[in-house]
Amino acid sequence: MAEENSQTASPRPVGEGRETRVVRSDVGRISAGARQHLGSELRTYYAAMLAEEQPPTLLDLIARLDSTEPASDAAAFRDGLLASLPALRVFALSLAVNSAVADDLVQETLLKAWKNQDRFELGSNLQAWLCTILRNHFYSEIRKRKREVEDADGIMASQMVAPAAQEASNELQQLMQHLAKLPAAMREALLLVGAQGLTYEDAAALIGCQVGTVKSRVSRARALLASSLGMDTRRAVV
């Protein structure tokens, strides 16, 4: 992956990425059965979101992208953006929750990536590069506003997009609502590891933090989510 500037794809921690404290391994532990069930639900959620029809505005944006790069290179990069769109949008939702905000994040990411495509190293992981651009932009906007994204009244949670390809089950809808209430850093780590199947190491590289920090966030997120869903837990989160 090519080295990107701090406004696009730098892998260094931003915003909440400065967290370094790792909690005890026994904090937030849940039963094996709850963990397996939760993992299955998260993978189902991720698959449903990937299958969702992509917004026409984003598809049109990619189709209208123009470049001074050689036609063959530009076409290949455009195809890569199109192929990455579903997973990129799910990642945006894991951070922003609100579908409109997520689509704005994706749009800004596509434009930045297109503008800086000469910085992308061919053959490296385009999806990871795009996700890094997106999360840096997300936390940069938070810093500008000097506030954390909150959803105290559940307004953003109620606006989470439901899979359009098929009617979401009540259980999946409930999972989506409770995911929306997790802190953004925990939700991001949980979906990267528990839903997308990234290793802790790969997730840490994408987020820009220590592996132990990712493990801590995933553990706490699992426990909070399992507890809010009424699953069996062994120990409360402290």
Image (cartoon, rainbow, N blue to C red):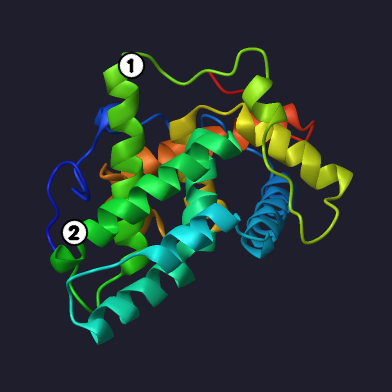
For label 1, count other residues whose C-alpha is less than 10 Å away and answer few (under 14), some (14-19) or many (20+).
few
For label 2, count other residues whose C-alpha is less than 10 Å away and answer few (under 14), some (14-19) or many (20+).
some
Q: How many marks?
A: 2
Q: Name the kind of residue labelled 1 in the image.
A: Arg
- The residue tagged 2 is 116
74 sits left or right of 159 in the view: left
Mark positioned earlier in the residue sequence (1 or 2): 2
Which image quadrant: the N terminus? bottom left
- Regarding residue 134, the answer to whether it shows in the image is yes
Please, is residue 152 above or below residue 136 in the view? Answer: above
- Assign a secondary structure to mark 1: helix
- Regarding residue 21, the answer to whether it shows in the image is no
**Residue shown at the point (57%, 23%) measured from the top left:** 237
3 sits left or right of 83 in the view: left
User: Residue 175's x, y, as percent?
Assistant: 73, 40
- The residue tagged 1 is 145
Please, is residue 91 above or below residue 96 in the view? Answer: below
**Residue shown at the point (70%, 48%) measured from the top left:** 38
Q: Name the kind of residue labelled 2 in the image.
A: Asn
**Residue shown at the point (82%, 51%) measured from the top left:** 168
User: Residue 70's x, y, as percent?
Assistant: 18, 82
User: Residue 87's x, y, as percent?
Assistant: 51, 60
73 sits left or right of 98 in the view: left
- Assign a secondary structure to mark 2: loop
139 sits left or right of 191 in the view: left
Please, is residue 233 above or below residue 53 in the view? Answer: above
- Please state which of the two labelled residues, at mark 1 or mark 2, is closer to the viewer: 2
User: Residue 93's x, y, as percent?
Assistant: 54, 43
Q: CA distance from mark 1 to mark 2?
A: 26 Å
